[in-house]
Image (cartoon, helix red, strand yellow):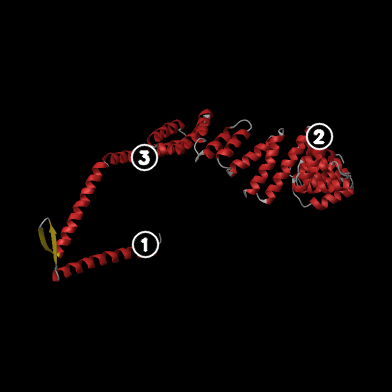
Amino acid sequence: MSEPKRTLQRSFKIFWALFRISALILLVLWLMHFPGDVYLRMLDYEFSMTLGFALAMLLLILGVLWLSLGVIRSILGFGTFWKQRRLRKNIIRAHSFFDHAVISFFSEDYASVQHDLARAIKYHPSREALYTTFAAVSALNSQQKDKAHELFFKLTQNSTFAFMGYFGLYHLCEESPVVLLEQARLKTDDHPWILKRLLDAYCEESHNLDALLKAQQLVHTLHEKHLFTKEQRNKSSAEVLWRQALYYQKQKDLVKATDLARQSYEIDDTLSGPAIFIAEKEPPQKAQKILLKACAHHPNPDVTTSILKCLPGTVETFHTFEAELGSHSHPEIQFLLAKLAYQAQLWGRAKQILSKIDESHYDARFYLLAAILAQK
């Protein structure tokens, strides 16, 4: 609360207290000058008193009633009082054990952590899920994987901490986490982290067409929930389609594989996999355009190999790639230019380009080309 507002409230309380005191004083003074008479008749008896005395008696009776009710309430609630007191003491004990567990955790005394958290749960059961989370992390850090698995699984049964349970089980999972993440998706109401991990898990199941089809649906779900931008959706869709193309290629269904690869390339023409696949089936001029763009966005040995395989090693080819990629400092692009210069028999230019590459990026291909050029 801001200071001006606090000051205003304090001023209002003082004003209200002064107003009540002033009203009481005025009432007393008025009754002293104009006492008035009050008559009370009950059971053939008649009582006569002043107005001030009558008000005093009324206040006294109300006060006695209020005190009596307070005593009765205390007697009836005596057991509840002690229960609340015991509960407060237990909560203080639980907090003390938890604080000690935190200190032990940072001291890497994981055995003490487990012991203290068990005591904390005993004294404060309503915080069991929180303490169990900490205990599971402690067990994971101490390499007690079975214990950590047990505790994380226990958390999955708690609606509030289900995500933490599945998060831990995901990191403990040594096999495909698809089934685990599908369960987590249902229990955590499509948590964003779970959905994205599930998409990755589906994509890793490259031998399973059903998983790849589910991945394609999940990409659209992520976009509909505003968890993916349009660019992210397109990139992920293209990657999933490319994985489906690879699946059909392994099944030797080249027609279906080519169709899916083209769909992937149409969505994202910077992916190297579909670009290579399509370029190998196109004439050199079109293949050059496709591979040039793929190399500019994702330079890697596969793209380099495809360029050297699909395109003629002419001076024209070298000049085309040098004009487009000459400003790039990526070692793979520089190696490609050196190799194209070598194929075009531009020995000096190939040596010059290769010398610009830091030797820390060399692999067997670089050393082989350097050895060949040294003989020219």
- Label 2's element? loop
Lower sequence index among marks 1 and 3: 1
Task: Locate residue 348, reporting x and y percent.
Answer: 85, 47
Disc 2 versus disc 1: distance between alpha carbons?
77 Å
Q: Quadrant of the C terminus?
A: top right
Q: Identify the residue at horizontal 89%, vertical 50% (top origin).
A: 316
Badge 2 density bin: few <14, some 14–19, many ≥20, Cα 10 Å: few
According to the image, label 3 marks what residue? Answer: 91
Badge 3 density bin: few <14, some 14–19, many ≥20, Cα 10 Å: some
Task: Locate residue 88, reporting x and y percent.
Answer: 33, 41
Q: Identify the residue at horizontal 38%, vertical 63% (top origin).
A: 5
Residue found farthest to the front = 44
Badge 1 density bin: few <14, some 14–19, many ≥20, Cα 10 Å: few
Residue found farthest to the bottom = 33
- Label 3's element? helix
Seen in the image, is 55 located left or right of residue 252? left
Quadrant hosting residue 173: top right
* Three-letter amino acid code of the residue under disc 3: Ile
* Three-letter amino acid code of the residue under disc 1: Arg
Which label sits on residue 6? 1
Q: Nearer the viewer, residue 239 or 26?
A: 26
Q: Quadrant of the N terminus?
A: bottom left
Lower sequence index among marks 2 and 1: 1
Which label sits on residue 34? none
Which label sits on residue 253? 2
